[in-house]
Amino acid sequence: MPDPLFHLSTALLPGALFGPRHTGAFVLGTLLPDLGSRLPGLALERVVALGVPIPEFVFTPWSVLHVPLGAGLGAVVLAYVFHETERRAAATWLIAGVALHLGLDTLQFHHNGGYPLLYPCSMELYQIGIFGSEATVPWSAPVALVSVIAWAVRVRNLPKPADVPD
């Protein structure tokens, strides 16, 4: 999978170029499939390492958050933490971030055959297979640097607040 830095940078770059208003939700949406599907399993593994017995079936359901339906529903639920006047826009940008994430993941070649993009209607695996699952790692730092430069230019060109008279 593209690493989190690559996903983060690919979300930040359009935010710098087109406007930062909903960049936070877009970035969060881009990270949501990996956070939702992998973070609970990692946390559960730490609990097991502490000696707490956890049944194996508790580890399994989190992977649904890395398919379009699960990640999209997760984005909609997450949108409810935003103020109600921003909820619709937040949901839209969270879902757009999820789409970017899954789109990048689908471009990869996977040894297991891809992702079940139509789950739960189909378990057929899909991938485009343009590059390997680790191919983005060398690109992460350069893409992050371009994102930082784009944001620096954007911030530098922000209008200065008017002088407030004493």
Image (spheres, helix red, strand yellow):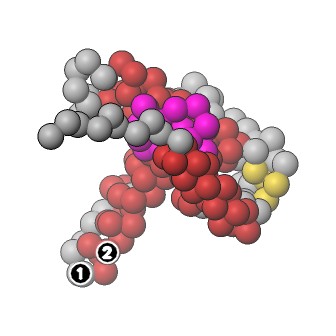
Q: Is residue 6 above or below residue 107?
A: below
Mark number, residue 157: none
User: Alpha-carbon neighbours of circle 2 within 10 Å: few (<14), some, or many (≥20)?
Assistant: few
The dominant secondary structure in magenta is: helix
Q: Position of residue 33 (x, y in %)?
A: 49, 46
Residue 28 appears anywhere in the view: yes
The residue indicated by pointer 1 is 51
Residue 71 appears anywhere in the view: no
Q: Residue at x 66, y 55 (%)?
A: 146
The residue indicated by pointer 2 is 46
| Closer to the camera in the image, 100 or 162 | 162
Q: Which residues are magenta?
A: 12-28
| Residue 160, picture quadrant | top left
Would residue 31 be found to the left or right of residue 51 on screen?
right
| Closer to the camera in the image, 57 or 25 | 25
| Closer to the camera in the image, 108 or 86 | 86
